[in-house]
Image (cartoon, rainbow, N blue to C red):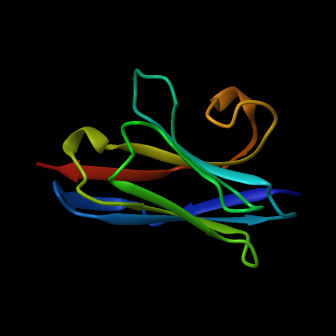
Amino acid sequence: QVQLVESGGGSVHAGGSLRLSCAASGRSMSVMAWFRHAPGTEREFVAAIRQSGGTTYYADSAKGRSTISRDNAKNTVWLQMDSLRPEGTTVYYCAADPCGRTKSRYAYKYWGQGTQVTVSS
């Protein structure tokens, strides 16, 4: 049984940093990714990373302020977020094993339960 468990969310002031983590169990994941979902909006892609070669992908909004990394031996992925802004207040979801477009939420088979990030001004 595949499970993705996120942690690391919380509250931070604007300009601060948070590091989210996602641990996968059940089997290794070729691609692990982060999405975010605010109320009233569609779930949107943030970043992804491949197991083989470590190729990374970022949404334009995340480039320069977020870094995705992974430890294949631990089947864990992290998202380091810096210079956070109040509009970054949302729930972040870990996803894995896409079938299709890496940046598409419809492609992912496995999802975590989400972790809340709150950025105050």
Task: From the viewer's perspective, tell me whether residue 84 is left or right of residue 29.
Answer: left
- Give the residue furthest to the left: 121
User: How many numbered tags mark residues here?
Assistant: 0
Vertical relation: 72 (above or below) 93: below
Residue 1 occupies which quadrant of the picture? bottom right
Observer-nearest of 69 and 24 = 69
Q: For residue 73, what is the image quadrant?
A: bottom right
Residue 46 percent across, percent down from the top left: 49, 42
Name the side, left or right, on which 59 lies relative to 97: left
Closer to the camera, 47 or 3? 47
In the rendering, at what x and y percent does residue 118 appear? 29, 51
Q: Nearer the viewer, residue 53 or 86?
A: 53
Residue shown at the point (34%, 52%) measured from the top left: 64
Q: What's the residue at 70%, 58% (across, down)?
A: 4
- Quarter of the image for residue 70 reads bottom right
- Please tell me whether residue 24 is drawn above or below residue 30 in the rendered image: below
- Tell me residue 110's x, y (percent): 75, 45
* Residue at x-position 64% and y-position 55%: 55
Picture residue at 73% right of the left edge, 64% below the top: 24
Q: Residue furthest bottom?
A: 73
